[in-house]
């Protein structure tokens, strides 16, 4: 018996000597991490750490590389032989690493301290704390971004004095900008719901090397929820619900995440219903009636009223409510450590969205002009497949191939009070097919020299149709009972169809010259082809009904980062960008304010040449940072909306009859040079474990060199200051926002984008708009919120925004901003 015991003890000791066990810990907390997958390169062996963070790696052969992965931490690769020196592995938490890692700049993960451009990252925690009603409201909280609104169901972000099709929107690596993204104000960003977002990354300044056309002001990259696999076959569901008093908003989101060993899935369904928006009543600016809605149209799809209706509460902005449905489905399949597949389906559909600024437009006789003016249901469908590559061969350390299809539908529905029985429809549909390849390779073992390269192919097919209905109206009930016949309506885009094709290749080189200096360089060649055909010339006759435009551009970037110490970073960037005219630029026909925009079939690309410098300083063991950036952008051959002679296809004064009225003719035209310059200062960080401070101020100016006009879309000085106090399970937050005044003399009057008519009237009989209007008054706001984490499964939030109920309008906006708002939300995991 004694021999048996001795042999058993010797066996246990021998087995323990041969075994190699590790403990996986978080570098931020030194606490064990459960559920970390440990695998070899081809994933033929996959193990998981237990609740104590321990995993036995004895089964792996000596000398192999082991891959450590957890969805909340950065992926780590270590050789088994190197792990004999220590039985602990530390992983960097992803939420912390995101302060130093961005994806949008190089389309591959790079540390922020190696990147020269100005970047802002909004984390999932930030999105929770902001609790935005839409993605436009989320962007309005990003430092150095201003958001314009023509109606509540929208939001046009402004980056460095540029907006609409001069700013590139990207979701999960897929370009959202399409052939009908317009100049002026663009409201399409709301089709990405905040409820599905994991983070947002914003790159400021021309970024054509990595992203091609449109990225003049910058790039806004939305990332939806990330997926993880798990040994434990986890199923987690969540429900989020919020109520807001200012517009009786009710938002409900349901999400389910499945995490298995060989695949993972995430499904989200979100529905929001927004009522009419209440403006603030505290008129500190002194304009008693500015923005008030004294009358409105109560017409609908089924009801016809030839007269306006008195609004019993002029501070309630009638015809601003809408609803929206958003669906996300993602599936993640890791084939091996070299190959992973990600499938992504997104769908967004709104109700009709009333165009508030047009519904409050008056005729020369002082009556409301439109009985109906709304965007028909705005629909965005996207399906994409991504192949994620890792260390495939000597030319690919990391790579992503993205194949995507998008189906975008939008429409415009109009009916005038003067023609109450005539309703017009303009319907647009865009099919977008795209293929992207983005790859990077380290040229040295230390990865201090990285070469990135890739390609992009994007094809847009635009279908534009229009129709007018003569309505049958019951004289007794005013109900619309049918359609008697149809009449012709001018289509918004070429009725014979149009397409827009882009091809591009790029290369970028990034090198650490030494421990203190990093050099970034890049080149991109882009070619575009546009074809369009007009058939119906009933309303407008062009010199040529068929057009074919071809453009090409070579853009470059050169950046340098200097880090004299670990806590200090200086950066400088020289970059170029361009925007090739799309179908909207070249072929749009539309009316606003008595002016008709017509096609200019000889429009050429506009170019941007940018220089900027930046400094970033860390304090308090890198928990607090202060950053400043200054830039100067030269626009050459810039595109501007100007009076136009449709017959000569040149600038000049002319008029045409449109929708039964004489209107001045405008078009997008090329001019010489213009400039935009500005700067920003931002700070953010923790003072101690309880206090977090943030804030910033932004300044922008811009003019044309040739005509000395002010550039459109230049916001006044704006900024914010916020402080968060954290104690146990509570976060208390107070924020102060301010916006300086913008004088009428600082507006661009001729182009019409700045909407000076939306500012207070000071002299109704003045000869010029500069003398007639006051410009944008200054304003300041205070907000307060409480976030309470009851448990891991339950979170509560209460917010009061615009505490003092100030009335104001954002610059160039056609709608008054929300007044005092009380909102409460709950998030429950089960």
Image: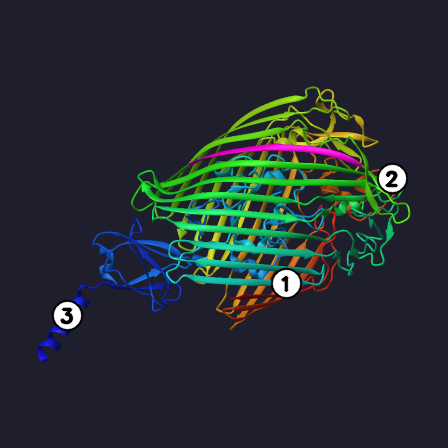
Disc on res. 242: 1
Whole-percent x and y of residue 737?
Answer: 65, 58
Bounds of the magenta segment: 454-469
Tell me the SS state at disc 3. Answer: helix
Which residue is label 3 attached to?
Answer: 11
Name the dominant secondary structure of the magenta segment. Answer: strand
Which residue is label 2 attached to?
Answer: 418
Left or right of 482? Residue 394 is left
Alpha carbons under labels 3 and 1: distance apart:
61 Å
Alpha carbons under labels 3 and 2: distance apart:
97 Å
In the displayed structure, 488 sits above or below 54; it is above
Asked if the residues shown at circle 2 and circle 1 are in contact, with their CB atoms under 8 angstroms apart, the answer is: no
Q: Is residue 513 visible?
A: no
Q: Verify whether residue 620 appears in magenta.
A: no
For this rendering, which residue is in front, 302 or 789?
302
Whole-percent x and y of residue 529?
Answer: 56, 26
Q: Quadrant of residue 60?
A: bottom left
Crowd band around label 2 with a 10 angstrom C-alpha radius: few (<14), some (14–19), many (20+): some
């Amino acid at each position: 018996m004694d021999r048996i015991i001795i042999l058993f003890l010797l066996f246990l000791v021998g087995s323990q000597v041969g075994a190699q066990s590790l403990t996986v810990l978080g570098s931020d907390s030194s606490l064990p991490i459960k559920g970390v997958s440990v695998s070899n390169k081809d994933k033929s062996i996959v193990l998981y750490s237990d609740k104590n963070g321990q995993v036995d790696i004895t089964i792996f052969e000596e000398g192999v590389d082991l891959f450590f992965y957890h969805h909340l931490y950065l992926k780590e690769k270590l050789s088994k032989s190197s792990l004999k020196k220590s039985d602990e592995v530390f992983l960097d938490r992803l939420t912390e690493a995101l302060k130093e890692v961005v994806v949008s700049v190089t389309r591959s993960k790079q540390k922020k301290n190696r990147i020269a451009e100005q970047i802002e990252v909004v984390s999932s925690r930030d999105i929770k704390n902001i609790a935005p009603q839409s993605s436009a409201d989320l962007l309005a909280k990003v430092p150095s971004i201003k958001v314009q609104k023509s109606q509540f169901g929208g939001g046009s972000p402004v980056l460095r004095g540029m907006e609409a099709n001069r700013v590139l929107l990207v979701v999960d690596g897929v370009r959202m900008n399409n052939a009908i993204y317009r100049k002026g104000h663009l409201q399409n960003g709301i089709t990405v719901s905040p409820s599905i977002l994991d983070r947002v990354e914003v790159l400021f300044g021309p970024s054509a090397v990595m992203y091609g056309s449109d990225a003049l002001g910058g790039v806004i990259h939305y990332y939806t929820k990330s997926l993880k696999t798990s040994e434990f076959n986890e199923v987690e569901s969540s429900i989020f619900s919020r109520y807001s008093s200012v517009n009786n908003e009710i938002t409900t989101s349901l999400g389910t995440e499945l995490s298995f060993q060989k695949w993972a899935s995430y499904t989200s369904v979100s529905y929001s219903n927004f009522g009419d928006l209440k403006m603030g009543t505290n008129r500190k600016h002194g304009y008693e009636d500015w923005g008030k809605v004294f009358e409105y149209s109560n017409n609908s799809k089924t009801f016809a009223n030839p007269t306006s209706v008195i609004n019993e509460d002029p501070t309630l902005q009638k015809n601003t409510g809408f609803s929206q449905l958003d669906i996300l489905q993602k599936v993640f399949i890791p084939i091996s450590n070299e190959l992973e597949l990600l499938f992504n389906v997104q769908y967004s559909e709104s109700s009709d969205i009333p165009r508030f600024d047009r519904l409050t437009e008056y005729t020369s006789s002082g009556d409301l002009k439109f009985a109906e003016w709304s965007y028909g249901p705005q629909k965005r469908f996207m399906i994409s497949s991504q192949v994620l590559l890792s260390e495939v061969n000597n030319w690919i350390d990391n790579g992503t191939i993205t194949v995507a299809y998008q189906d975008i539908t939008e429409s415009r529905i109009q009916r005038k009070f003067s023609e109450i029985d005539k309703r017009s429809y303009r319907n647009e549909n865009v099919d977008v097919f795209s293929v992207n390849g983005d790859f990077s390779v380290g040229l040295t073992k230390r990865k201090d020299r990285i070469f990135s390269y890739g390609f992009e192919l994007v094809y847009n097919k635009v279908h534009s149709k229009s129709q007018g209905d003569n309505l049958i109206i019951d004289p007794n009930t005013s109900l619309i009972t049918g359609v008697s016949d149809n009449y012709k309506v001018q289509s918004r885009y070429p009725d014979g169809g149009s397409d827009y094709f882009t091809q591009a290749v790029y290369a970028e080189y990034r090198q650490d010259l030494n421990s203190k200096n990093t050099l970034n360089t890049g080149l991109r060649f882009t070619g575009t082809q546009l074809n369009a055909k007009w058939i119906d010339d009933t309303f407008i006759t062009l010199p040529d009904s068929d057009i074919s435009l071809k453009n090409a551009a070579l853009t470059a970037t050169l950046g340098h980062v200097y880090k004299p110490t670990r806590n200090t970073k200086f950066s400088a960037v020289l970059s170029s960008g361009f925007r090739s005219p799309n179908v909207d630029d070249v072929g749009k026909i539309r009316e606003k304010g008595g002016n008709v925009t017509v096609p200019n079939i000889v429009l050429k690309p506009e170019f941007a040449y940018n220089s900027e410098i930046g400094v970033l300083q860390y304090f308090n063991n890198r928990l607090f940072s202060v950053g400043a950036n200054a830039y100067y952008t030269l626009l050459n051959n810039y595109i501007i909306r100007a009076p136009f002679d449709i017959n000569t296809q040149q600038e000049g004064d002319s008029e045409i009859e449109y929708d039964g009225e004489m209107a001045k003719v405008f078009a997008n035209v090329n001019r010489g040079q213009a400039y935009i310059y500005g700067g920003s200062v931002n700070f953010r960080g923790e003072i101690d474990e309880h206090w977090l401070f943030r804030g910033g101020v932004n300044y922008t100016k811009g003019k044309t060199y040739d005509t000395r006009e002010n550039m459109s879309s230049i916001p006044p000085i704006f900024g914010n200051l916020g402080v968060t106090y954290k104690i146990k399970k509570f976060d208390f937050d107070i924020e102060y926002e301010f916006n300086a005044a913008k004088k009428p003399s600082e507006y661009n009057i001729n182009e019409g984008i700045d909407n000076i008519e939306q500012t207070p009237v000071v002299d109704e009989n003045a000869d010029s708009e500069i003398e007639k209007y006051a410009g944008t008054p200054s304003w300041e706001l205070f907000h307060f919120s409480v976030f309470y984490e009851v448990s891991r499964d339950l979170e509560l939030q209460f917010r009061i925004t615009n505490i003092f109920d100030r009335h104001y309008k954002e610059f160039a906006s056609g709608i008054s901003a929300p007044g005092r708002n009380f909102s409460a939300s709950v998030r429950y995991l089960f």
